[in-house]
Amino acid sequence: MPAPPLHATVLSFEDARRVVEEQATTVHPAGTESAALLAAAGRVLAVAVFADRDIPPFPRSTRDGYAVRSEDLAQLPATLDVIGEIRAGEQLDRIPREIGPGQAASIMTGAPVPAGADAVVMVEYSSQHGERAEITKRVEPGQNVVPRGAEARQGSLLLDRGRRLNEAAIALAASVGKAKLEVYRPPRVAVLTTGDEIVDVGATPSPTQIRNSNSYSLAVQIRQAGGEPVLLPIAPDEPQGLRRLVEDGLKSDLLLMTGGVSMGRYDLVEQVLSEMGAEFFFTGAKIQPGRPVVFGKCGAGKCGAGALARDGALAPQGGAYFFGLPGNPVSTMVTFELFACPMLEALAGQLPRKLAFLHARLKSEIRIKTGLRRFLPAVLSGEFENSEVELVAWQGSGDIAATARANCYVVVPPDREHIAAGEWVAVMPR
Ligand code: AMP
Ligand code: MG
């Protein structure tokens, strides 16, 4: 069958990113599973978490000191009768029923403030003599007390589904008694490396062969983004063999290919997918590294979809998305981060988030050609408020060693050909 003509669609970085973000809104995670609280860290919440009671469940003192009626402190020093001591976790029947005029209760951080009292004076502004305390500082009504339910009302939403569970979210779930959480199943992401020159890590390369590193950088990035990598065998630069492996890869939730998307005579990825009836959203983005990046979808009923996968599962309904990432190792890493990541996160059930860069001061000037948005490997350093960033010396987008020395990318807008030392530049951490 002759290949339908391929129309190159090269988008600006922002447009390409928006196209991915748009498509990402159409996909859904594979299913949910229950995870023990700690095992749920880093996963995406599938069932929202609500407050099982008011938080705090009682008016909570935030200081060690005296629970007082603030109006009693109009004249300083004020001497108050101490009618009890309230420790954190104090039993209800041991807490004074009410603090009356001229009275106070000694109270500890985290203890319930009794009725009648409307503030807590820090112990630092007091001295106790027997049953009486002398207070030397005024307090505003409500000072050093968190009212019952001020942080959350019983039944209110605390954690919505679609959020990735970090330490604060896990702490919040723990605080409302969730020993288990319902999380989304990780999407399966197929990784297909192409290239006749590529051999796997265990093999001894001939003098002109290159070891496969892209499958491994991608597998790490896939895991970090919440997916489960499925490494396929290395595909040859030959249409039949490549097509068989592409068909295999399309049975996963997402297919990432590396290599074979440039202008070379043996760059066959687009040709093969085009023959399979794929739809291409873009075939390039005005970035460097990573210009030849390809994003598309193989619709249901085409592309061999509907066939049974090896494990008996059907190909994803409505077709599978794929990325053709350029084979140069740094291009592969950068284009995953910029384009594949949002699609993967959506398949993992995560709510969409915009890509936002940090800023740091440039240590040494940059001179570069205009026309492409650059993502240049760099080292972010400095201390406290003084973050600074410097490019690492590199041999271009094939230089894995330089990229391994870097901890971020400096993002250079396409219209800048010179950035002076000391200027603020955008930084994408990695
Ligand atoms: P390509 O995009 O196929 O033209 O490849 C661009 C460059 O990346 C070539 O120098 C390839 O040898 C190299 N390359 C392609 N795939 C890989 C891989 N999986 N691991 C390491 N290098 C690769
Ligand atoms: Mg190649």
Image (cartoon, rainbow, N blue to C red):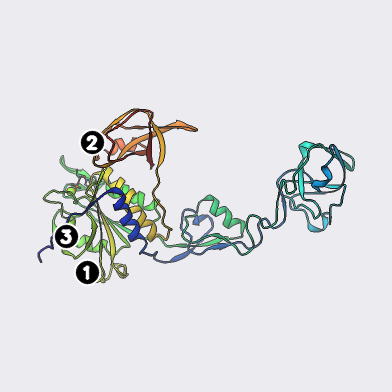
Q: Residues within 10 Å of mark 1 (few under 14, many from 20)?
A: few
Could you say whether the residue bearing mark 1 is in a helix, strand or loop? loop
Whole-percent x, y for residue 274 in the image: 17, 61
* Ligand 1 within 8 angstroms of badge 1 C-beta: no
Whole-percent x, y for residue 52 in the image: 63, 63
- Whichever of labels 2 and 3 marks the residue nearer the N terminus, that label is 3
- Whichever of labels 2 and 1 marks the residue nearer the N terminus, that label is 1
Would residue 228 be seen by someone viewing this image from the given angle? no
- The Cα atoms of the two marked residues, 2 and 1, are separated by 42 Å
Would residue 113 be seen by someone viewing this image from the given angle? yes
Badge nearest the viewer, 2 or 3 = 2
Badge nearest the viewer, 2 or 1 = 2
- Taking 430 as reference, is 268 above or below it? below
* Ligand 1 within 8 angstroms of badge 2 C-beta: no
Kindly identify which residue carries mark 2: 369
Q: Residue at x 43, y 58 (%)?
A: 351
In this view, the residue in front, 380 or 186, is 380
